[in-house]
Amino acid sequence: MKKQVKFESHEIILKLMTENENQKYCAIRNRVENRKWFTDRNVLSEQEQENWFKQYLVKESDYMFSIYNMQGDFLGGNAIYHIDFVQGIAEYGRLLKDTAVMYTKGTGYLATMAAIAIAKEQLQLQQLYLEVYQDNLVAVKIYERAGFEIKDRTQDSSGREMYKMIIKL
């Protein structure tokens, strides 16, 4: 069973994603301007997302978060997943913000820092890693500002350049 983790500051809240929030996240993810940043750029049906969420609920190595501002607006999501509790490492990603909602500049950075705090303090992890498209300049800047360092460069199956980034906690 997943630990009940949550992060709350005076600016942002991260909490485990619910089924309703999962559908909101899927709608944001399916927008053309957002799909290009995912390795699977296909439009997901509600059923596909629902099936994914059911599998997520039973995975102890996957924590999907909803991002809220202090006014209670759903802003998007992010995740810590592929957790190896023995080695103390996990992948960070799925960071997605709803640009249709008014939010303070820096939400992606705040959500990333909140996830790092959860990984370190509540999940007792020692390292996070991620993969991000090299041309996703906004995300790369967020991750570098949060303390991630580029460790390698790879390509996805279509030949698109990606960075592998790591942060020690």
Image (cartoon, helix red, strand yellow):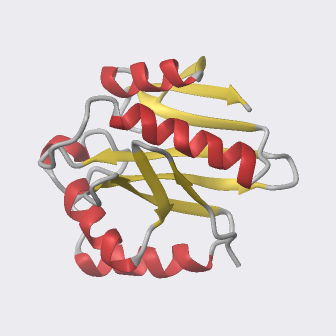
Q: Looking at the image, which is closer to me, 46 or 73?
A: 73
- Where, quadrant-wise, is the C terminus in this rendering? top right
Determine which quarter of the picture holds residue 59: bottom right
Determine which quarter of the picture holds residue 66: bottom left
Question: What is the x, y in percent for residue 15?
Answer: 49, 62
Question: What is the x, y in percent for residue 118?
Answer: 64, 49
- Where, quadrant-wise, is the N terminus in this rendering? bottom right
Q: Looking at the image, which is closer to me, 81 or 164?
A: 81
Asked whether, in this view, residue 99 is left or right of residue 169, the answer is: left
Name the residue rendered at 49%, 19% in the picture: 145
What count of labels does the image hold?
A: 0
Name the residue rendered at 47%, 55% in the picture: 14
Asked whether, in this view, residue 141 is left or right of residue 152, the answer is: left
Determine which quarter of the picture holds residue 150: top right
Q: Looking at the image, which is closer to me, 2 or 157?
A: 2
Whether residue 156 is visible:
no
Question: What is the x, y in percent for residue 28?
Answer: 21, 56
Asked whether, in this view, residue 137 is left or right of residue 124, the answer is: left
Q: Is residue 100 above or below residue 58?
A: above
Name the residue rendered at 65%, 55% in the picture: 82
Q: Is residue 111 above or below residue 25?
A: above
Q: Residue most toward the front?
A: 10
Name the residue rendered at 38%, 79% in the picture: 19
Whether residue 162 is visible:
yes
